[in-house]
Structures are given as C-alpha cells and as structure tokens.
Amino acid sequence: METKLTQLLKIKHPIIQAPMFLVSNTAMVIEGMKEGIAGCIPALNYRSLEALKAAITELKAAKVEGGSFGFNLIVNKSNIKYKEQLRVICEEGCDFIITSLGSPEETINQAHQVGIKVFCDVVDLKFAQKVEALGADAIIAVNNQAGGHRGNLSPKDLIVELVSNCNIPVISAGGVGCKADIDAMLSYGADGVSVGSPFIASTEANVTDEYKQACVEYGADDIIMTERISGTPCTVINTPYVKKIGTSATWIESVLNKHKKLKKWVKMVRFSIGMNATKNAATKATYKTVWVAGPSIEHTHAVLPVKEIIKGLVE
C-alpha cells in the first residue's frame, strides 16, 4: 500500500515500529526493515555516544531496500544528552528522527542540513501547526490509545482534525494491534501508523519473559493511567504491585508540584525514580512490576518473532 509515509521513507508498508524506552533495539529494527517497515529506537536506550554510534553502524550495514530506520530524541532541557545525541545522529546518518517533549526547531534545522527527515510527536492541533511551521516533515499524532505518555483525543478525532488543518503527512500513534486497526486509521485520513506495544512481546525484545508474558495475558481493560513513573500520566499494566502502590502522586509531591520554584526538581526526582523502577521491571526478575504498555496488547496472544507480528499487521 502506497501512502505519503511509504513515499517519504521508501518503505513497503505504512508502519513505523515505535520507539520504546528500554524495549526497542537494533535486532527488532533490522527484522522490521526486512519486512518492509520503518523502525525507530530511543537514543536514550544507549548509555554512551559510542554505543549509539555502534547501533547506527549496525543498522546502516543491515539496511535493505524497502526498509528504513531512525531514532527518537527527547528534545527538552531534562535530557542533558540531547545535543550530543543529535550531533552523533547527524554525523553518522539515519533516515529520520522522531522528536518528543519539546521544541524540535534545532533538530529540524540540523537534521535537514544532512538530509535526515524529522517527524514530531504532537497531541493536538496547536502543536501540530507549530511543528509544521518549523519545517517538520510529518506529524506523529499521539492519541488517547497510545502506550506510555498518551494524548487526550481519540484516534479518529485527532487524525481528522490534523488532516483538515495541516499540509504535512499525519502518522497515527496509538491503538493499533491488528490490520483492521491500521485500515481504520488510514480511513480517517492518516498516512501511516506508529505501532509500539505489540512489539514488546517479540522474541527480539531484550525485556524479561515476564514482561512479554504480561502483554500476552493482560488486555485492554488492564491498562490504567499512573502518575507514579514520571509525574505525568502514563499507561501501565495494572499488576498487583501497581494496585498496591496506587496511581496518584503522593500528597507531598502534590503539594510541591504547586510550588513554582520546586516543581521542576520534584518532577526530575520523580522521573528518575520512576525510570529506575521501570528499567528494573523490564530487565530483571522483580516483584516491583511497573510495565508500560498500551491497550493494543488486547491483540497480543503469544510471544512471536517481529517478522510474524508484522505479518499479522499487514495480512
């Protein structure tokens, strides 16, 4: 199927394997490229610039016709690694960058100088029009069915609003677990989809078997919102541990979040604690199971190779 997204990235299917913190890796992206889709990895999945360079080298060597790869950058001030990550990505090269949580202006300017396309996460029309004015190549429309940090609008409402008011391609993110979901997003006017949660339960993912099996055993009704990871509402699987600790910020966090000078630091501390908890749950055997996922795990019925997951999305 040919869409504006397949034309932009020269891929066979209008699908981006979404960047997932701690989950996405080169093995997953390489298998995705072989099947004719685009794959994306958060730059923050790499602890050093050397590791990031090595990943780019590996992906460039493995790239095949009909596939493409890119990286996700957190572009706000909380990511102290951002500028150096952007420099390395632009020097080493990739097909596209997805920006999140901040102004993409610097990324767009630098990436375009070396021929890298830039797609920007947005949750509403206001920010979509801002990134379009800055020169973004496409919009990642994050809806209320997305895993992790999600938007507030339904897939249909968000896609229709953006397509009606923007002139660059719209890629829908959230709520895709099977081919019927992709067909629905395209029927609303999207030029492609970004798919994350179904790939958590892939044989190539470097997370624990328990995390993968949770995506098989739990469903859409088991996904809830919590403020206990980053201070911003985030979707997780409602495990017994999550039920035990609750989903709201503590009373002291709530009080401090109202303090103009302190709220920034409170969020940084909460983000650090939450990320460590998420990392431990994803990569170690632990009873503290804070597993990030979206409602599209409803369609995950077994742990499968990336190749088989993609077949289920396109056939």
Image: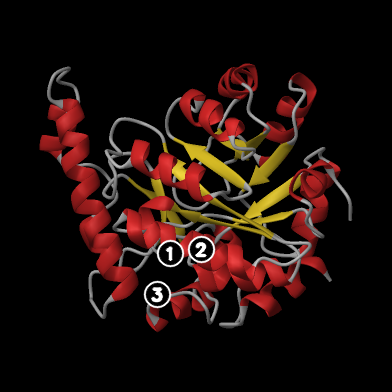
- Work out whether residue 307 or residue 195 is closer to the camera in this orientation and state it: 307
Give the secondary structure at mark 3.
loop
Q: Position of residue 90 (x, y in %)?
A: 50, 42
Amino acid type at circle 3 is Val
Amino acid type at circle 2 is Thr
Q: Position of residue 103 (x, y in %)?
A: 46, 25
Q: Which residue is mark 1?
A: 54
- Work out whether residue 300 or residue 162 is closer to the camera in this orientation and state it: 162
Badge 1 vs badge 2, beta-carbon distance below 8 Å: yes
Tell me the quarter of the image containing the C terminus.
bottom right
Looking at the rendered image, the disc whose residue lies closer to the viewer, 2 or 3, is 2
- Residue 109 occupies quadrant: top right
Up-down relation of residue 33 to residue 140 (above or below):
below
- Residue 156 occupies quadrant: top right
Amino acid type at circle 1 is Ala
Q: Cα distance, mark 1 to mark 2?
A: 5 Å
Q: Cα distance, mark 1 to mark 3?
A: 20 Å
